[in-house]
Image: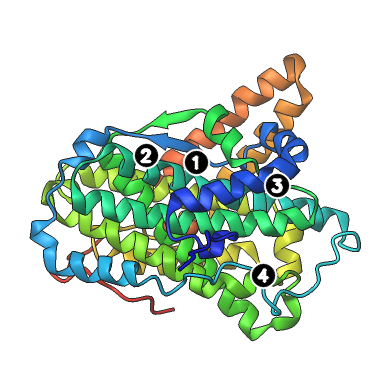
């Protein structure tokens, strides 16, 4: 029998296949893609690297039963073939799109694609460097999913004449080193907040289909279920070592919660036209996503942030204004720009500290970790 290699990232069963397909497509897009990838914007998520040997040494026996179930679910691969354009993909009138919306939406797609690919690169590297079968299998499966997600966003971008050149990014983008425990906190949170973001938009557009200005949002439910599973895997990894979520590490957890929520709020407020087109108030959206993420993170974190504290929302707004002023000062340049940068950075730091020092809400972590997507 002749087995044909898949030609679309949606059908790729391994990360290697998924990336090879995108590499082949990038040949046609390299010029625009390179130009976009070279742009330096605040919206571009980071790439991470870590101590892969330490991660390889994780023993999942304390969570074996849940682990095996989760892996079996991921191996069954319910979303294979999902991330491709079908007849549900309505025609997108890129030229007719209001220019401000078009700009912000493309920013959103590039930023999302880079974030998906950032996960892909980290997970693929862990799979490549490891010898621990449990760990390498998990990371191979997660990298497979992220390659599909990035590939699908690239499909959408290509219609606008743009594609993110993933091979180029892998080689040229700066990598930030994080200790494994910081990778767990940051990645767990980014997977779960990713789930909360995608499902909140999906439900909103389900109720208000006339606001769906682009077909990609129709794919968000299955998409967010992938992210949910990835988050589950990190929750189980953290459960293998109680030290990770107790003692002084609780302060780190609080730091990451504050940083991830704060960054999301600031970034989303940089896209007013995008949120207006969706009919979503970014303040409402932020609180909704934070509430869902906090509820889910009770599965493993001993605290949640008090997002209803009287200081929370006003301080987030201060952080956002300080960041907007920082941007403006950078653009201005010169002495006035340099002074403006200094002042705005100090205000942003003060706002962050104020958010960080809001007393957290204690949570008794349940013995049973595993959750199913419930929103
Ligand atoms: Fe993803
Ligand atoms: Fe993910």
Using residue 234 as the reference point, say whether residue 18 is left or right of it.
right
Say whether residue 317 is visible.
no
Residue beneath disc 4:
85
In the rendered view, tell whether residue 268 sits above or below residue 248. Answer: below
Q: Residue at x 31, y 72 (%)?
A: 73
- The residue sitting at the top extreme is 335
Q: Which of these two is toward me, 274 or 250?
A: 274
First along the sequence among labels 2 and 3: 2
Using residue 91 as the reference point, say whether residue 81 is left or right of it.
left
First along the sequence among labels 1 and 2: 2
User: Contact, CB < 8 Å: mark 2 with mark 4?
Assistant: no
Q: Position of residue 7 (x, y in %)?
A: 59, 59
Residue beneath disc 3:
163
Residue beneath disc 2:
125
Real-space Cα separation, disc 1 to disc 4, in angstroms:
43 Å
Disc 3 is placed on an element classified as loop
User: Contact, CB < 8 Å: mark 1 with mark 4?
Assistant: no
Task: Between label 1 and label 4, give the one nearer the viewer.
Answer: 4
Task: Between label 1 and label 3, give the one nearer the viewer.
Answer: 3
First along the sequence among labels 4 and 3: 4
Q: Which of these two is toward me, 195 or 347?
A: 195
- The residue sitting at the front extreme is 1
Real-space Cα separation, disc 1 to disc 2, in angstroms:
36 Å
Q: Which mark is residue 351?
A: 1
What crowding class fits label 4: few (fewer than 14 Cα within 10 Å), some (14-19), or many (20 or more)? some
Using residue 11 as the reference point, say whether residue 137 is left or right of it.
left
First along the sequence among labels 1 and 3: 3
What crowding class fits label 1: few (fewer than 14 Cα within 10 Å), some (14-19), or many (20 or more)? many
């Amino acid at each position: 029998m002749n087995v044909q290699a898949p030609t679309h990232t949606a059908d790729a069963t391994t990360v290697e296949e998924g990336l090879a397909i995108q590499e082949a497509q990038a040949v046609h897009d390299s010029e625009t893609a390179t130009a976009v990838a070279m742009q330096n914007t605040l919206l571009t998520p980071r790439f991470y690297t870590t101590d892969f040997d330490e991660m390889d040494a994780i023993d999942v026996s304390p969570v074996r039963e849940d682990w095996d179930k989760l892996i079996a679910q991921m191996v069954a691969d319910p979303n294979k073939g999902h991330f491709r354009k079908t007849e549900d993909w309505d025609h997108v009138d890129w030229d007719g799109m209001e220019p401000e919306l078009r700009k912000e939406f493309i920013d959103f797609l590039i930023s999302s694609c880079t974030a998906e690919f950032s996960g892909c690169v980290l997970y693929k590297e862990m799979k490549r460097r490891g010898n621990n079968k449990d760990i390498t299998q998990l990371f191979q499966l997660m990298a497979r999913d992220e390659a599909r997600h990035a590939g699908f966003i690239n499909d959408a971008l290509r219609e606008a004449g743009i594609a993110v050149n993933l091979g180029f990014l892998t080689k040229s983008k700066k990598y930030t080193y994080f200790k494994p425990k910081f990778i767990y906190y940051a990645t767990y949170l980014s997977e779960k907040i990713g789930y909360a973001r995608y499902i909140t938009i999906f439900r909103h557009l389900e109720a208000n289909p006339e606001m769906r200005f682009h077909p990609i949002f129709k794919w968000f439910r299955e998409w967010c279920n992938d992210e949910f599973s990835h988050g589950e895997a990190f929750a189980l990894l953290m459960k293998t070592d109680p030290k990770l979520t107790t003692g002084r590490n609780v302060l780190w957890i609080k730091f990451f919660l504050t940083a991830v929520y704060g960054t999301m709020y600031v970034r989303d407020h940089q896209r007013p036209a995008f949120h207006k087109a969706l009919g979503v108030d970014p303040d409402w959206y932020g609180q909704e996503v934070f509430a869902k993420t906090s509820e889910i993170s009770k599965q493993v974190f001993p605290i949640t942030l008090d997002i209803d504290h009287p200081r929370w929302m006003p301080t987030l707004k201060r952080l956002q204004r300080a960041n907007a002023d920082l941007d403006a000062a950078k653009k201005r340049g010169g002495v006035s720009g340099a002074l403006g940068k200094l002042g705005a950075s100090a205000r942003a730091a003060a706002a962050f500290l104020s958010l960080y020092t809001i007393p957290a809400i204690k949570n008794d972590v349940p013995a049973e970790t595993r959750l199913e997507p419930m929103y």
